[in-house]
Amino acid sequence: MPSGGARHPFETYLVINRVEGLKKGVYRYLPLDHKIVFLFDKNNMEEEVTEAFSGQKFIASSAVVFIWSCIPYRSEWRYDVAAHKTILQDSGHLCENLYLACESIGCGTCAIGDYNQEIIDKFLMLDGEEEFVIYAAPVGKVKNE
């Protein structure tokens, strides 16, 4: 994905609920290796995710939730306060690519900006200052009725 100034300020976390061949839990995407690494699982993961996303149960019950965090310094050192503009633009491009990928495999997604910052950052064990959640999107199969 292109990124303003090739700064790539995002990290991708996946909350896996129902993905064939993967253990339920939270994963982190490693872009240089094009792999995911298992981080942790919790007994009450669905409840914590539902609480973090303002009670929206459909998010926690999806097959997978993509959660993007931002590390602003990756862009700020080069662009100062103007970095925030490219970070916001890039987050839209990032999620739009997920929409396109989902459409190509018969899945659906929904961009989510309604979340409790403190709860979701704590859930992913982020400090909330140097790295914090900026966007999310649940993904699942589309039911044809």
Image (spheres, helix red, strand yellow):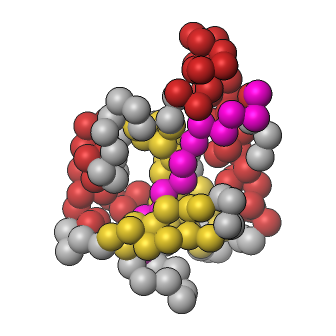
Q: Position of residue 23 (x, y in %)?
A: 42, 83
Residue 21 appears left or right of 114: right
Residue situated in front as seen by the camera: 100 or 45: 45
Numbered disc total: 0
Q: Quadrant of residue 88?
A: top right
* Part of the protein shown in magenta: 5-17
Residue situated in front as seen by the camera: 33 or 38: 33
Give the answer, above or below, for where 52 lies relative to 21.
Answer: above
Residue 57 appears left or right of 19: left
Residue at (57% x, 42% y) in the render: 10
Q: Position of residue 72 (x, y in %)?
A: 52, 28
Give the answer, above or below, for where 106 lies relative to 88.
Answer: below
Any magenta on residue 97?
no
Give the answer, above or below, for where 52 lies relative to 48.
Answer: above
Residue at (54% x, 87% y) in the render: 20
Residue at (41% x, 57% y) in the render: 59
Q: Quadrant of the C terminus?
A: bottom right
Q: Is residue 52 visible?
A: no
Residue situated in front as seen by the camera: 69 or 113: 69
Residue 46 appears left or right of 140: left
Q: Position of residue 81 (x, y in %)?
A: 57, 10
Q: Position of residue 97 (x, y in %)?
A: 73, 50
Residue lying at the far top in this picture: please name it. Answer: 81
